[in-house]
Amino acid sequence: MSQIVSEVVAANAQYAADFGEKGKLPLPPGRKFAILTCMDARLDPAKYAGLAEGDAHVIRNAGGRASDDAIRSLVISHKLLGTNEWFVIHHTDCGMQLFDDKIISGLLEKSLDTATIDEHGWHDHGAGPGSVHGHYVKWLSIGDLEASVIEDVQRIRSHPLVAPNIPIYGYVYDVRSGRLIEVPEATAAGRPA
Ligand code: ZN
């Protein structure tokens, strides 16, 4: 077993030992809201937004972007599980600001191994082979941080399967301070009809 696997299994044994009444939680989120946010390891939505098990849906992907799959989850979250307020939360120093479609596709074309970045940009060190399939993917990288929050709130707001009465709030999480900073233009775009 890898070291990480044994650590995870041991941590879980500890968690399950103190599980208590959480086994009786209902499936729909008790506080009826959902957060779409980045997978960045420094972000812990349960801590930064004060969530306990059973409180809210947290949908995570690279960037916290409103991808088709994120919207699929949000639609299920409301339609079948009753959430009626949504947050889109991107963050400072996001890895998605460090590349664009052309850069990642070029790196993947060389090899599938982990690349590195320095002041001159990205470098691929893998032996290859890579794959051209990256050129067919929209990677949803981020240029301007606030603009990406606004864009994603607008995209969710205008989606035909999203109920118009759900407010969608836009925020940026600051990885230096732990603070959530509202993007007023995003929240305005997400105002319920
Ligand atoms: Zn990120």
Image (cartoon, rainbow, N blue to C red):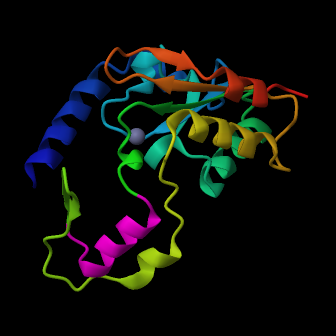
Give the total number of marks visible in the rendering: 0
Which SS does the magenta portion mostly show? helix
> Can the viewer see residue 60 in this picture?
no
- Residue 101 inside the magenta-drawn segment: yes
Quick check: 58 left or right of 159? left
14 versus 96 height, above or below:
above
| Quadrant of the drawing holding the N terminus | bottom left
Instruction: Look at 10% across and 54% down and name the residue there.
Output: 2
Instruction: Report the span colored magenta.
Output: 100-113
Going by the picture, which residue comes out furthest to the front? Answer: 120
| Quadrant of the drawing holding the C terminus | top right
- Residue 110 inside the magenta-drawn segment: yes
Please tell me in which quadrant of the rendered image residue 169 appears: top right
Instruction: Look at 38% across and 39% down and name the residue there.
Output: 94
Instruction: Look at 65% across and 42% down and name the residue there.
Output: 152
Instruction: Look at 13% across and 81% down and name the residue there.
Output: 127
Q: Nearer the viewer, residue 23 or 115?
A: 115
156 versus 191 height, above or below:
below
Please tell me in which quadrant of the rendered image residue 183 appears: top right
Q: Which of 62 and 186 is in front in this view?
A: 186
Quarter holding ligand 1? top left
Q: Where is residue 191 in the image (x, y as percent from the top left)?
A: 81, 25
Q: Nearer the viewer, residue 46 or 40?
A: 40
6 versus 121 height, above or below:
above
Quick check: 149 left or right of 193? left
Quick check: 127 left or right of 139? left
Q: Where is residue 59 in the image (x, y as percent from the top left)?
A: 54, 40
